[in-house]
Every structure is written in C-alpha cells, then in structure tokens.
Amino acid sequence: MTFKTYRRSAVQNFIEAIPMTKSWFITGSSSGFGRLMTEQLLARGDRVAATLRKPEVLDDLKTQFGDRLWIASLDVTDAAAVRRVIADAFGKLGRIDVMVNNAGYGLFGAAEEVSDEQIEQQIDTNLIGSIQVIRAALPYLRAQGGGRVVQVSSEGGQTAYPNFSLYHATKWGIEGFVEAVAIEVAPFGIEFTIAEPGPATTSFAKGIVSPPSMAVYDKTPSGDIRRALAAGSFALRGDPAKMVREMIDSVGRTPAPRRLTMGSGAYERVREGLTQRLVELEAQKDIALSTERDD
C-alpha cells in the first residue's frame, strides 16, 4: 500500500464515520472571524467549543443556543492552559471534528520601531500559541481516528507589507509548521487547511498594536502604508461572513484543500509573489546545480 493510498483510505474512513452535525473547537471567538464562525455553526445546528479571554462576551449566544455552545477562558500564550482547556473540551464534547486555530493579532511597525516585549508577544500569540493548540489536539484527533484542523493565517503568510514584518514572521512561520505536521499526521486521518483571507472588514484593525513611529521612515514605503491606513484608502474588500462560510465549507471537501486564499486582492498578490519567486528560482538554477559535490 502506497503512502498516498493509505492517506486517502484513512481520511475517507474518518469522513464516513462522522455525523452530519459536527463539533468544532475555535480559539479567538470573541470577535472577527472567530465570532462569525461560531454564529454560523450554531445557526446550522453544530456544536461549538468556543475559547476566548473574556467568556462573558458570548453570553448572548449561550442564552440562545444553550448546551450546543461550550465556552472556556483561554489565553493561547499559556501552554499549560491550552492543554487543560483542550482536554476539558474533548472530555465534555466527546469528539471534536474540527479544530480552528484563529486567535491572533497584528503588530504594526517597522522592524526597528517595535520593542522586544512586543516582538515576544506577537510570536507567543500568533506562532507559538497556534503551534501549542495543534500539538495539544493531535493525541485526541489520533485517538478518535482523524479530524480537520483549520489554521487561520492570512495572505500575509505568502506575501509581505512594510510595517508588518513581525506579523509576517508569524504567518509564514505557522504555514511552514502546518506543511510539515500535515505530512507527519496524514497516516492518522488528520488533515489541515490553511485559510488565507485578504484584507476584510473585521475588527482586526482595532486589535493592531503600534509602537511610536520613527520620523526617518516617513518618506519610505512604511510611511506610505501608514498614511494609507490612516486615510482609509487601504482597500478592505473582503466580506468576513463569506470568508467564514468558505472556511466552514472547506471541511466538507476531501482531500482537504491545503490552502484557501480568499479575496481578489489576496489572489492577485499571492499569485504575483509565487510567480516572481519561481522566476527568481529559475534564474539561478545553474548556481543551485553547481554547488553539489563533484562525486
């Protein structure tokens, strides 16, 4: 049996074994994509284990949907809490079909403007926090015979804007992590999808952290993007509700799409970036081949 045949068989067995209604675990459920996804899933009859820093924010949904919504306080930068809450969620729900890694925020500033503390917080939340959620969930997903993980990244996992260097570091980092882990756990019927939304009208901008700016960057690309954001001329064309719907629908596709790029701008920028990298790679093919041992 080849690896690919085994992988399809394990995944197909998982898909056929799960009920029509699913159980989901979502981090960062207080607002933005996390809140919208929680609402859409509950409205269609699924169960949701929603985690966030301030559980009372979901009191209205708890009143409306009762036992189909399980809520827990969670700061993903606390690895011990991540393991505890995920264990509690699997214990309470019995089975979780889809893990959604959504918690995160953006650090906005040129690389030399941001502080050491801000860098650590950005990496601890977006990168290490996401890694620890996945690590904590894997034993349970293996034990139940499979599952899906939706990692919310960004077009910023394949592209780059000035002033978002630390944010990009976390998104490019988590995408690399997911690529490798997806290969490691494929034999257990566990699949991953990396969601890459472009700029959308969510509350993301309200959570952006910005250090004091340095005047030396005023007449640079960093200054240009600051002015564009301040003036409201940075296009936010993505519809968050539609993006969330596509993330949810992706779980019904097999095999799981490895990436889900959303938004016309995101599509164009990711395509341009990939094309340019391929051109650059081909341009130095001779160099690549010339650096191997003669024997």
Image: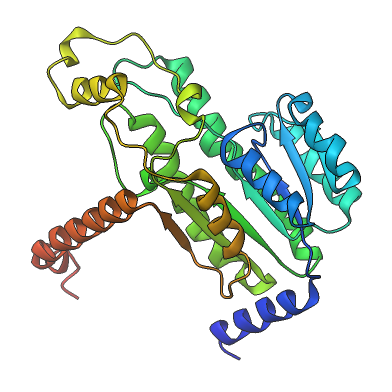
- The image shows residue 1 at horizontal and vertical percentages of 61, 91
**Horizontal side of residue 6 vs 120, given as left or right:** right
Task: Look at the picture and state if 290 lies above or below 73.
Answer: below
Q: Nearer the viewer, residue 99 or 122?
A: 99
- The image shows residue 119 at horizontal and vertical percentages of 44, 23
Task: Look at the picture and state if 11 lies above or below 63.
Answer: below
- The image shows residue 46 at horizontal and vertical percentages of 78, 56
Task: Look at the picture and state if 169 lies above or below 153.
Answer: above
Residue 147 lies in quadrant: bottom right
Task: Look at the picture and state if 120 lies above or below 277.
Answer: above
Q: Quadrant of the C terminus?
A: bottom left
**Horizontal side of residue 145 vs 40, given as left or right:** right
- The image shows residue 161 at horizontal and vertical percentages of 28, 35
Q: Nearer the viewer, residue 64 or 51?
A: 64
Query: Going 56% across and 75% down the picture, which residue do you hit?
Result: 255
**Horizontal side of residue 91 vs 189, given as left or right:** right
**Horizontal side of residue 8 vs 178, given as left or right:** right
Q: Nearer the viewer, residue 240 or 289?
A: 240
Q: Nearer the viewer, residue 158 or 69?
A: 69
